[in-house]
Amino acid sequence: MFVAQERLSQVSNHLSAASKSGKQSILEKHPDDVVVTCALRTPITKGGKGGFKDTAAADLLLGAFKALIERSGIDTNLVEDIAVGTVLAPGGGATEFRAAALAAGFPVTAAVKSLNRQCSSGLQACVDIANQIKAGMIEIGIGAGTESMSTQYGPQAISEFSELLESHTEAANCKVSMGVLSEKMAKAQNIPRSAQDKFAAESFQKAVEAQKQGLFDEEIAPLTVKWTDPKTDEEKTITVSKDDGVRQGITAESLGKIRPAFAKDGSIHAGNASQISDGAAAVLLMKRSTAQRLNQPIIGKFVQASIVGVPPLLMGVGPAAAIPVVLQKTGLHKDDVDIWEINEAFASQCLYCINELGLDAKKINPKGGAIAFGHPLGVTGARQVSTLFTELRRRGEKIGVTSMCVGTGMGMAAVWVAE
C-alpha cells in the first residue's frame, strides 16, 4: 500500500536501534524497560441504553482509577503524571479528570492532562506516559481513557469549519463522515457486504464465547452507578460487571437483513460497525527496576509505537499504514506477533487492513472487538492493553500489537510483550 511504503521509506535508513531489534531482543528483560503492572477497564455499555447511560465520563474514570489503586496496591503518592484520552468531553475533560484523580485518592502532587487524538486517544495516553518514563521525566504514571457517548455524542460534537479550511480540499475532507468514508472504501476495494457481515458475526460469536468462559472477568472492574429506568423513570443503583452490548445468536444471515446506514445500495450498517458506547480504562506504567523495587507484579512491557497520517478520505486504512512502521522499528516480522488487537471501527476497514497486510485471521481480536462490545472513542486504545495482556498470558504467548484507524486520516499501532 502506497501510504505504508512511503512512510517506511522515511524511516528505513535511520533506525539507530535496528541492530538491537528483532524478536529475541524484544523478549529480553532490562532494568529500564517500561513495564505495565496493572491494566484494567470498566465494562463497556451500550450508548443511550446500557448500564452507564446516566454516568458522566469523569465518574467512569473515577471508578477505573479506584479499581487501579486497589488492584495494584500502588502508593498513590508515587504517581507523578496521569494522561487521559477522551474525544467528546467538553473542554477536553481537563478540569473534571483532574478532579476525578483527586477524588480517587491521588495526591495533589500527581499531575493530570487530557488529550484527544480521536480513536487512538487511549493508546496515545499510554504511549505519552511510557515515553515520559523512558525520557526520565517521571518514574511512575498512568495512561487512561474515558468516554460517555451517551451524554456527549451527537451533532454538537462536530466542529464547523472556517472558510479557510473549507476552501482547502484535503482540509475539508477531514470532516467527511467516517461511515461515508468506509462505505466508499468498501466499494473501491471490493469488500462485499457478505464478507463484512461474516466478520461482524464472528466478532459477536467470539465475544459471546469469551463472556461465557469468563475471559473478560480479569480485565474488567465492576462499577456501581446510578441508573434511571427508561420505562418507569425510577432511579436505581446498579452494579455493572459485564459488557452489555454483546449479543447472542448473531449470524451473518441475521446481519444480512439489516438496512444499510449510509447508502441505499450500501454495505455498512449498525450490525457491522462499532457500537456507540460508554466506559473507561487505566494502565499503570513504570520502569522495570522501579516495579521490582516496589514489588509490583509485572504483566508485560511497552516496546514501541508508531503514528502515521493517511489521506483523510482513506481514514480506515490507518492500521495498514501504522503497523508496518512499528514492525520495522522493532525488527519484528508479522509472523512474530501472537495476537493482533485491531479496532473494529467498521468491518470493511478492518478487513481491508487484515487483507492488505496478509495477517492471520485467527490471531485477530480473539475475544471479539468493537463491533461486538463497543468503541468508546477515547477508551479503546487503553482498553486494548488489558484485553491483550490477559489473553496473551492465558495462552502462554508473548507478543501482541494494538492498532486502530483514527478520524481525519491517521493510524496508530503499538507493540507489547506479556510476561
Image (spheres, helix red, strand yellow):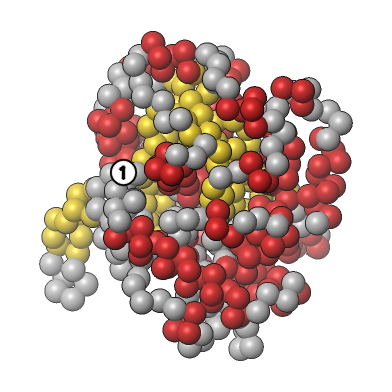
The three-letter amino acid code for the residue at tag 1 is Glu
Q: Position of residue 357 (x, y in %)?
A: 71, 55
Q: Quadrant of residue 400?
A: top right
Q: Residue furthest top?
A: 293
Image position of 217 (left or right of 83): left
Image position of 310 (left or right of 121): right
Q: Quadrant of residue 197?
A: bottom right
Residue shown at the point (36%, 58%) measured from the top left:
210
Say if residue 78 shows up in the picture: yes
Residue shown at the point (49%, 79%) measured from the top left:
252
Q: Quadrant of residue 9?
A: top right
Q: Position of residue 188 (x, y in %)?
A: 76, 74
Say if residue 94 shows up in the picture: no
Residue shown at the point (58%, 22%) measured from the top left:
28
Residue shown at the point (48%, 25%) measured from the top left:
35
Camera-nearest residue between 13 and 269: 13
Camera-nearest residue between 64 and 6: 6
Q: Does 323 appear above or below 235?
A: above
Q: How many marks?
A: 1
Image position of 367 (left or right of 360): left
Q: Does 360 appear above or below 333?
A: below
Q: Does 54 appear above or below 264?
A: above
Q: Position of residue 273 (x, y in %)?
A: 52, 69
Classify mark 1: residues with Cα within 10 Å, few (<14), some (14-19) or many (20+): some
Secondary structure under tag 1 reads loop
Q: Quadrant of the N terminus?
A: bottom right
The residue that label 1 is drawn on is: 218
